[in-house]
Amino acid sequence: MDKNFATQRSYEPNGPLVNSEFYPGWIVTWSQKGRIDPSVDEIINGSKYMFKLGASFNYYMFYGGTNFGFWNGAETTSAVSVFIDVG
């Protein structure tokens, strides 16, 4: 997170810090075996850290969805399951 905010600062030294997509989880593909998601504590601590920095942030996506029949997730290597468990 610090690396990304440092990159933002290198381009805009005085502007707000922004994390427009803070992920509490990730997509699941049909062929995927196992997954590693951040723990609840990691999500809470990351949120508190950004709040302490005065950063703006958005949980993306807090609740998943579907597209029923369209090319889901635009993943080229594997199909994304209809259920997207992002947290």
Image (cartoon, rainbow, N blue to C red):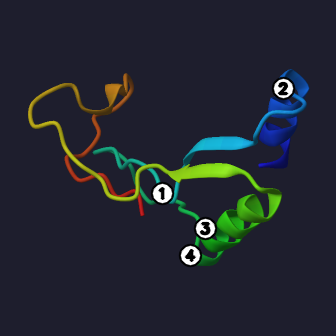
Type of amino acid at the residue the image marks with label 2: Glu
Q: Separation of disc 3 and disc 1 at Cα?
A: 9 Å
| Residue 25 - label | 1
Report crowding for label 1: few under 14, some 14 to 19, many 20 or more residues within 10 A (C-alpha).
Answer: many
Out of 81 and 59, give the one closest to the viewer: 59
Which amino acid, mark 1? Gly
Instruction: Residue type at mark 3: give it.
Output: Ile
Coordinates of residue 75 in the picture (x, y in percent)? 37, 28
**Disc 3 and disc 2 in contact, CB within 8 angstroms:** no
Q: CA distance from mark 4 to mark 2?
A: 31 Å
Q: Is residue 6 above or below residue 74?
A: below
Q: Residue at x 84, y 22 (%)?
A: 11
Of callouts 4 and 1, which one flags the residue occurring earlier in the amino acid sequence?
A: 1
Regarding mark 1 in the picture, which secondary structure is present there? loop
SS category of the residue bearing label 2:
loop
Q: Reading the chain from its start, which is encountered first: label 3 or label 1?
A: 1
Q: Quadrant of residue 6?
A: top right
Q: Of the numbered discs in the image, which one, if any, rests on residue 40?
A: 4
Q: Nearer the viewer, residue 84 or 47?
A: 47
Would you say the residues marked 4 and 3 are in contact, meaning their CB atoms lie under 8 Å apart?
A: yes
Q: Which mark is residue 12?
A: 2
Res. 16 image quadrant: top right
Quote the CA–CA distance across marks 4 and 3.
Answer: 5 Å
Indicate the position of residue 48 as horizontal and vertical percent values. Answer: 71, 69
